[in-house]
Image (cartoon, grey):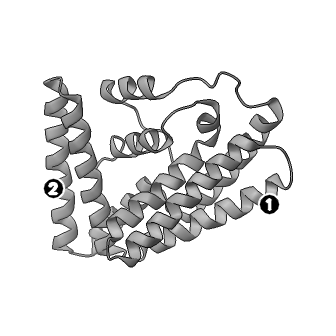
Amino acid sequence: MKRPFLAGLTIAALAAACTPDATGPSPNELLLAQEAQVIAQDAALSSGVTHDGWLRRVFEALRTTDDPEARAFLAQARVYQDSARMAIQAGDRAAARHYFHLAFRSVLSAVIEIFPNAPARTGEVVDDIIARIELRLGDRDAPRIRLILAHVGELRDRADAALAAGDPVTALALNLRGIQILHFLVEHIRYAHDHDAVADGEMEEGVTP
């Protein structure tokens, strides 16, 4: 998963959200975070369950399968993105973020239309990444990493609850947020920022339906 090029909107949002931690991680914890990040990246990329990985699968499937509903979701996503760009030009950043969010959920709806197991499969990979990182940490002192793992674990619980409640789009969005946070774990332990907002912004503005 490549980090998307962020428009001026996101750059401003991230600048406001990201505040360097006054103490910062210890050198040992930073090294552990780098190792954990590699674990997350390898697992996510090899399984193809990143947000852009699922979208590539959708495009590949639509080359050989006609799914009108999936195509309609993608078309709606493009409309939302056009509205987001117009909002940026008008200087309305709040509206732009809203439209990017709606576009992203439309893309996820297309994914689920073709791959109904996407939320569950993505959740399984997140669980596996967490388990592998915890095994790598052992009893080493890594408080910031463990806080991030606990947060991603909470996202998994919320995703499972959403799926059980019949909301697979929210379930997939939460699981992908967890993947995104772990994929850039080093940055998330370096900065005292809103991990969810940063991860969502990266995904929502980086998708091209």
Q: Which residue is drawn at 47% across and 74% down?
A: 120
Residue at 15% in and 56% down: 76
Residue 74 in picture, x, y percent from top left: 21, 58
Image mark for residue 76: 2
User: Which residue is painted at 27% across and 65% down in the image?
Assistant: 110
Q: Tell me which numbered mark, 1 or 2, is placed earlier along the sequence.
A: 2
Query: Which is nearer the eye, 138 or 109?
Result: 138
Spatial CA distance of label 1 from label 2 is: 42 Å
Residue 62 percent across, percent down from the top left: 27, 69
What residue do we see at 70% from left, 27% from top? Answer: 24
Q: Nearer the viewer, mark 1 or mark 2?
A: 1
Could you tell me residue 130's position as x and y percent?
Answer: 66, 60
Q: In this view, does 35 lie to the left or right of 174?
A: right
Q: Residues within 10 Å of mark 2 (few under 14, many from 20)?
A: some
Element assignment for label 1 = helix
Mark 1 surroundings: few (<14), some (14-19) or many (≥20) residues within 10 A: few
Question: Of residues 18 and 50, which is closer to you in this image?
Answer: 18
Identity, as a three-letter code, of the amino acid under mark 1:
Leu
Quick check: can you spot residue 165?
A: yes
Q: Is residue 69 above or below residue 26?
A: below
Disc 2, SS:
helix
Mark number, residue 135: 1
Q: What residue type is labelled 2?
A: Gln
